[in-house]
Amino acid sequence: MKNKLILGGTILANFFVAQFALAAAVCRVNGKEVPCGEFPWWIFIVVFVVGILAFIFWLRMLIHAAKSTDPSKVAWIILIVFTNLLGAIIYYFAAKKSAVPPQVV
């Protein structure tokens, strides 16, 4: 576990060093010095948020499949686990949307 943390920290540190080197670099366009460009950090934030939302959706579909009374629930669970987000989307449209909601008495 300690080795994985050290490796992850080393990779992260190298990434930031490379980004700082790129930010400090100067490029030439038509003989004029211009900044080489800044890295669009918002891309990481968007990918992170979309990834978290996709994981939450996947987890909710897996829990719904596990709690269902459908006779093919084991097949649905296997599909969701092994195909990840695609399986969760298939389950959502094929089984969850067509499921009859429980009656409140």
Image (cartoon, helix red, strand yellow):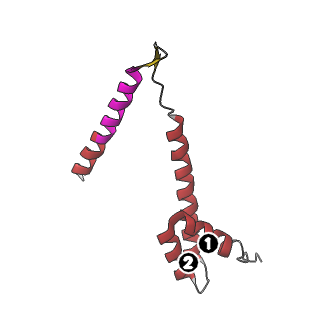
Residue 42 location (% of width, % of height)? 54, 35
State the extent of the magenta-drawn residues as a range.
11-26
Whether residue 49 sits left or right of residue 99 in the image: it is left
* Total residue callouts: 2
Q: Nearer the viewer, residue 63 or 45?
A: 45
Q: Which residue is mark 2?
A: 76
Decide whether residue 18 is among the magenta residues: yes
Three-letter code, disc 2: Trp
Identify the residue at horizontal 51%, vertical 46% (top origin): 48
Residue 17, image x, y percentages: 32, 30
| SS of the residue under disc 1 | helix
Q: Are the residues flagged by discs 1 and 2 in contact, CB closer than 8 Å?
A: yes
- Closer to us: 74 or 26: 26
71 above or below 77? below
Badge 1 amino acid: Tyr
Please indicate whether residue 3 sits to the left or right of residue 104 in the image: left
Q: Residues within 10 Å of mark 2 (few under 14, many from 20)?
A: many
Residue at the front extreme of this rendering: 30
- Mark 1 is surrounded, within 10 Å at the Cα level, by few (under 14), some (14 to 19) or many (20 or more) other residues, namely many
Q: Is residue 8 left or right of residue 30?
A: left
Q: Which residue is mark 1?
A: 91
Q: In the rendered view of the protein, which quadrant contains the C terminus?
A: bottom right
Tell me how far mark 1 sits from mark 2, CA to CA: 7 Å
First in sequence: mark 1 vs mark 2: 2
- Asked if 1 appears above or below 61 in the picture, the reply is above
